[in-house]
Amino acid sequence: MSQLHVSQHPLVLHKLTVLRSVDTDHRSFRELVRELALLLCYEATQDLNLMVQSVKTPMGQAQGYKTQDTIGLVPILRAGLGLVDGVMELLPSVQVWHIGLYRDEKTLRPVEYYNKLPTEPTVNVCLVLDPMLATGGSAVATVDILKKWGVKRIKFVGLIAAPEGVERLTTAHPDVPIHVAALDERLNEVGFIVPGLGDAGDRQFGT
Ligand code: PRP
């Protein structure tokens, strides 16, 4: 599990606790997801490549930097949508490529229903966004799609992971770092993370 990064930031831990609460309403839930996405994105982008770039200040020239990578956000529909706004506050020029997957309730396998990626990759780094890494099936399927597309650097950014999902994603794609706010105990018999936060899609969208 060396590629697993569980945030220790006090703000992340505090906000995640409020997010988990059964008493948190949809509106607060969405706002917390947005804020957590921003904080986790800050941690997940620590190794972006920079090029040196000089900048003119009112007092003279300073040596500065410019990020070199072209970044794509890949929210997994539908729950991943809630993470997009927070990340875009930090990375306003990113491209957003949506991948639609739902998890079959019986088999727990991901079923693809939306993918409009162009033939050639248009970014060199992808952040896969999904609040929950449960069995890991959706994340593995998404990384499979992105690698086939031709992207070499891929990171998973989510809120809560189950050990089963971490194991599955790191086994299938050991090069993909996983950034989350918490590693929970386990999956229950219907594939929900325990203690988790319930259904992240339903809680964001009021369904
Ligand atoms: C949830 C969640 C992930 C997936 C995680 O989505 O948002 O996409 O399940 O499960 P896995 O790791 O076992 O694949 P869901 O299928 O409920 O769809 P939704 O986002 O439309 O609610």
Image: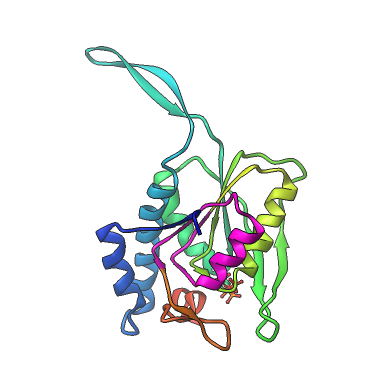
Q: Nearer the viewer, residue 72 or 173?
A: 173
Q: Nearer the viewer, residue 175 or 21?
A: 175
* Residue 101, x across and y down, in percent: 66, 68
Rendered residue at 65%/69% (across/down): 137
Rendered residue at 63%/67% (across/down): 138
The residue segment tinted magenta is 156-182
| Residue 201 appearing in the image | yes
* Residue 86, x across and y down, in percent: 41, 55
Residue 96 in the image: above or below residue 206: above
Q: Is residue 135 left or right of residue 207?
A: right
* Residue 43, x across and y down, in percent: 39, 49
* Residue 185, x across and y down, in percent: 44, 77
Confirm whether the magenta stretch covers residue 160: yes
Q: Residue furthest bottom?
A: 189
Q: Residue furthest top?
A: 60
Confirm whether the magenta stretch covers residue 63: no
Quarter of the image where one finds residue 56 = top left
Ligand 1 quadrant in view? bottom right
